[in-house]
Image: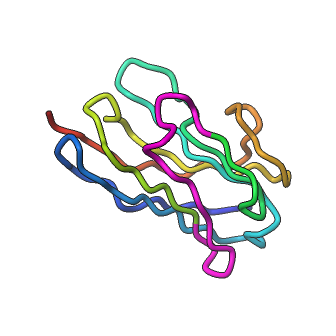
């Protein structure tokens, strides 16, 4: 079992920045890959960024490339999503997820555990 708790969401103006955190517990953090997803009202959950077990490989969806950075601190059992130059289109509930494999996971079906999500709202 892995428990995930997201934090850091809130309201920000367009062009601003925000950092999300995902605190993990239950299994050795450095043994699995993780990712950030988001779900806007009326839309499906979609991948935003993913990172492998060591942090040496990352993946970003095109719409966030150059603006978002995914990272992890295995010593702190925490993953992060740094979001810069935020746009109203980034408004969504953001979820972190864990894939118990080591490599990047870029489809939601690969993920084994999910947090409850944190709301990010970007005002124009």
User: Does the magenta run of residues contain 66?
Assistant: yes
Residue at the farthest front position:
66
Residue drawn 20% across and 49% down? 12
Q: Who is closer to the viewer here, 19 or 64? A: 64
Q: Name the quadrant of the C terminus.
A: top left
Q: Name the quadrant of the N terminus.
A: bottom right
Residue drawn 73% across and 69% down? 29
Left or right of residue 87, residue 109 in this image: right
Number of disc labels = 0
Range of residues picked out in magenta: 60-78
Residue at the farthest bottom position:
75
Residue 85, position in %: x, y? 31, 44
Q: Is residue 42 above or below residue 54?
A: above
Residue 54, position in %: x, y? 77, 64
Residue 56 placement: quadrant: bottom right
Left or right of residue 30, residue 17 in this image: left
Residue 22, position in %: x, y? 52, 62
Residue drawn 28% across and 35% down? 87
Residue 2 placement: quadrant: bottom right
Residue 68, position in %: x, y? 47, 47
User: Does the magenta run of residues contain 35?
Assistant: no
């Amino acid at each position: 079992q892995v428990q995930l708790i997201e934090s850091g969401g809130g309201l920000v103006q367009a062009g601003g920045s925000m950092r999300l955190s995902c605190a993990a517990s239950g299994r050795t953090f450095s043994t699995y890959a993780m990712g950030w997803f988001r779900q806007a009202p009326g839309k499906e959950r979609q991948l935003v960024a993913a990172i492998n077990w060591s942090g040496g490989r990352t993946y970003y969806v095109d719409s966030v490339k150059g603006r978002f950075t995914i990272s992890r601190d295995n010593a702190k059992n925490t993953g992060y999503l740094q979001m810069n130059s935020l746009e109203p289109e980034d408004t969504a509930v953001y979820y972190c997820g864990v894939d118990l494999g080591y490599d990047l996971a870029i489809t939601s079906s690969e993920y084994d555990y999910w947090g409850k999500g944190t709301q990010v709202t970007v005002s124009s």
